[in-house]
Amino acid sequence: MMYLTYYFIEITMFLAMLCTMFIVSAKNPMVSILYMMALFVMASTYLYLMGLGIFSLLYIMIYMGAIAVTFLFMMTLLDMNSTELSVKSNMRDLPLVLMSLMVLTMSGLMMYSNENILINKMLEAFGNDYNTIMTQNWFNMENSTLLTTLGNVLLTNNAFMLLVLAMVLLLGMMGPISMTMKHKE
């Protein structure tokens, strides 16, 4: 079963990379938004398969809901014919996208591999102290509310993922603003 999940994760990563290349290479902004929605679904599926179900649901609710509607609303404000004619080729950005995807994929593979040198060196240096710190129950679960427990999990165990999602949300908000601004020529 674990191998099947691993293959689903690999397929999801490949489809997400494909959607990313299609977003950059699309000439029509509306088609690019459709590929972006597919990318959000792939990212949510990836998070779910990695065991981060709450982030998967948050990703779907935030991006497929609010941000997708905002993108579509902003795209209706654009004059589609002039936008489509002004874009000559988006393929010039493709090497940058491929290089970024390769770096992110390699860093993700290094992070989740058992042969990570940095983590092994850290475990050797701290030894039992590291295990004591990581296995210590730092708050009493019996007297905490659901909101407190969710906050503790989000801000301690999954803080990096929360920061990554916040950066994607920031980029999602800046995209429509930059697309609708009038540029002086």
Image (cartoon, rainbow, N blue to C red):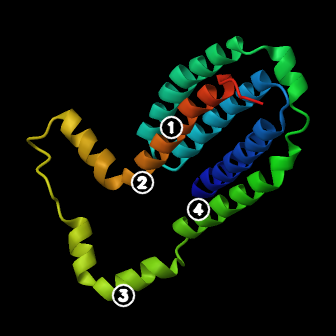
Mark 1 lies on a secondary structure that is: helix
50 versus 74 height, above or below: below
Type of amino acid at the residue the image marks with label 4: Gly
Which residue, given by chain and number where applicable, does mark 1 sit on? 170
- Badge 2 amino acid: Phe
Q: Residue 152: image x %, image y %?
A: 24, 47
- Between marks 3 and 2, how big is the CA–CA gap? 24 Å
Alpha carbons under labels 3 and 1: distance apart: 38 Å
Whether residue 59 is situated above or below residue 106 in the rendered picture = above
As drawn, the residue found furthest toward the front would be 185
Identify the secondary structure beneath mark 4.
Answer: helix
Distance, label 1 to label 2, CA atoms, is: 15 Å
Residue under circle 4? 108
Nearest to the observer: residue 79 or residue 138: 79
Indicate which disc residue 124 carries. 3
Which of the two discs, 4 and 3, labels the residue nearer the N terminus? 4
Instruction: Indicate which disc, 3 or 1, sits on the residue closer to the N terminus.
Output: 3
Q: Disc 1 vs disc 2: which is toward the camera?
A: 1
